[in-house]
Amino acid sequence: MSERILLKGGRVVDPASGRDEVADVLIEDGVIGSVDASRSGASVVDADGLVLAPGLVDLHTHLREPGREDKETVETGCRAAALGGFTAVSPMANTEPVADTAAVIHEVRGLGARAGLCDVFPVGAITRGLGGEEMAELGEMVEAGVRMFSDDGRCLPNARILRNALTYAKAFDGIVVAEHCEDGPLAEGGQMHEGYHSYSLGLAGQPREAEEIVVARDVAVARLTGGRLHLCHLSSAGSIEIVRRAKAEGLRVTAEVTPHHLVFSDEDLGTYDTNFKVHPPLRTPEDRDALRLALADGTIDAVATDHAPHAVEDKEAEFDQSPPGTIGLETALAAVLTHLIDPGLLSLARAIEAMSTIPARILGAAGHGGPIEPGRQANLVAFDPGAAWVVEPPFASKSRNSAFLGTTLRGRVIHTLYRGDLVVADGKAQR
Amino acid sequence: MNKHLLSIHDVSAEDVVRVLDTAESFREVGTRVIKKVPALRGRTVVNLFYENSTRTRISFELAAKRLSADVINFTTSGSSVSKGESLKDTALTLQAMGADAIVIRHSSSGSPLTLTKWVKGSVLNAGDGTHEHPTQALLDLYTMRERLGRLEELRVAIIGDVLHSRVARSLSFALVKMGAEVTLVGPPTLIPPDAPAWGVQVSYDIESVLPKLDVCYMLRVQRERQRQQYFPSVREYARLFGLTRARVSMLPEHALIMHPGPMNRGVEIDSDVADLPNSVIEEQVTNGIAIRMALLYLLLGGTRTDDGEAA
């Protein structure tokens, strides 16, 4: 492949190098070339008015394959990712079978490579079958390419198994253990955040302490082990305070927040719309505001989608019988642009950092997250920050359970380049 | 009136009076030899019960029949639901068959509201999860007004497992709406933490509350709550919060004893207490039919006389 593409006149926002300027970017053989080089023969892509940034990196994705291909496949999920400006995703291990062996990791990676729409970095299970008891063969999965381990969907039931996982993982470079923080018995049966709205809707509540207790426990275990801990989808203001103190102490702790927790709150559940049923639950507007501030000041490192596709018939059910989750790959960037950047809560550079530069660093995904400079793999997104659109089906995802359905967002991905290939051009997937 | 009855919040204080007054006029029908009026002739009412129920289902069935409506009883066992049919598909089926009103009982909070998205007819909530049971609240208000002559400033205690009780919620909201003074009584584990926001008082001491009451309303306490560690034993529950003969003597003479049923005799209420003269538990059942007739009539027929017949 010796294709040359010249992205002309875009606003390059590249937190890794600190650049924010209008510039041309030349792509040659899948990598970023020197703009001083001869541009002859390059196909020109007009990026005037677009923001050009390193491709987004998702730390938290559910692609459902193998097992629930009716909800999503690696291919459809990767297409949704590319359309959302992502050049890398991290499918979680809660598939059927669970991604707790190198064999399943190889399968998912192979499916990703075949789709060729973005990099797929499978997350391995910490425990066999997500059972919370026996450690899975982490070393073999590392050899198969795993960078992150998580039993996401479930919380590790006790501190001992986390201690052993964090300690054992030190044998391998750059491995991070990610935790879904939820105290099982305290959260049991909870359909939404426990508070005024859960009482008024007659839905069993799940108190924010169910998350905070585990965040506090896990931070203590991170201190005990010196291991690298990542906290998934934080939802409560109290959790943020614990993370803030852990970071001030110098512990190796990172944290993520989802777009839906940054935008919605328990006030949105008034009509029992199951698209707002997510785990952890949407909490109060005060929690949401605290999450926004924590993302802005870096206490929360990254935005991750927790893209969780579910079949229509599963979501069109009684509230307490419907599975939790919202899709998010196709709306994440626009949600952040609309609800955080436009109101001035977040700078564009910080948003790109939280959706690309830092998640790439957490995953150790070389070739992602910038800097946008010669010799680097050309994983890029070009988006129109002002374009308004209404979130509605059809989606590239096989599912349509979006909490953003029917809302208007601003910010539209126009081009996505994955290893120099225009996998999305003019807002349309090319494969 | 709104088109649907999903929650007491759907009903204004004026509507409550209108429902109670309409029920008053319908109650007489139940005393006739021929207990029937043609008000809803040709209309179809479906009872869609996803949860077991005796009194509420039969009460709705009788109410609809006394209004001459065609009544379909749909219970989940022995129906398409036991074959795995979803609520949506069941709703669309009933819609296709032309149901004018659907009375739904479901263990999932919010199901009646969800149902309104798929059907054109009126939806009446006959109890959804731990959310609301508005027709029970209205029949209780009817019973109190009939016996005590007013609702304003009535002092009512609702005693028991308030946390999991849709009856307690609807009744509290309705009583507060009508100007009554409500006290919730029970072990703190079974009182919703946001109760003060309902405009009610909370007490953990039944005996301090009883002497001031006009109505002592007992709630069913499921033995399952003991297994879930909401209280240590049924024995201790009955001892601390049960309505015993001794406690009844602390009530003013005029005070009513009420219970939505089904009772756990010996747990929240002593067996002989339930049968005392100031216990109006059976009247509640009788009044339930009149209230449900009034509601079906007002939601379905009250403003429509397309066949030229009114009640």
Image (spheres, coloured by chain):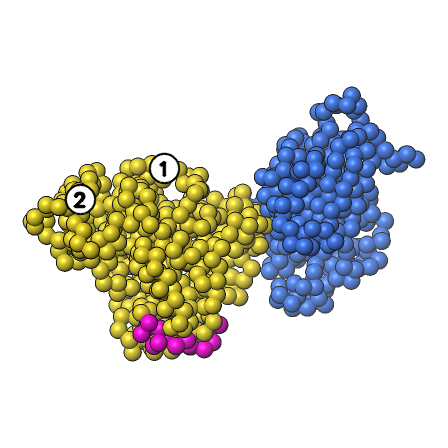
Indicate the position of residue A210 as horizontal and vertical percent values: 47, 62
Circle 2 packing at 10 Å, graded few (<14), some (14-19), many (20+), is some
Which mark, residue B90?
none
Dot 1 or dot 2, earlier in sequence: 2
Q: Dot 1, how many residues are within 10 Å of its Cα: few (below 14), some (14-19), or many (20+)?
A: some
Q: Which residue is mark 1?
A: A389
Q: Residue at 15% of width from left, 46% of height from top?
A: A42
**Amino acid residing under circle 2:** Ser
* Magenta region: A131-144
What residue type is disc 1 on? Answer: Trp
Chain painted yellow: A
Q: Is residue A260 visible?
A: no
Give me the residue at 31% from left, 47% from top. Answer: A430
Instruction: Name the residue carrying label 2.
Output: A43
What is the spatial separation of the Cα atoms under label 1 and label 2, in whole angstroms?
28 Å
- Label 1 residue SS: strand
Quarter of the C terminus of chain B within the rendering: top right
* Chain colored blue: B
User: Whole-percent x and y of residue B50?
Assistant: 69, 51
The magenta stretch spans residue A138:
yes
Q: Residue at x 71, y 31 (%)?
A: B300
A166 left or right, relative to B247: left
Task: Tell me, yes or no, whether the highlighted magenta stretch contains residue A137.
Answer: yes
Q: Is residue B227 visible?
A: yes
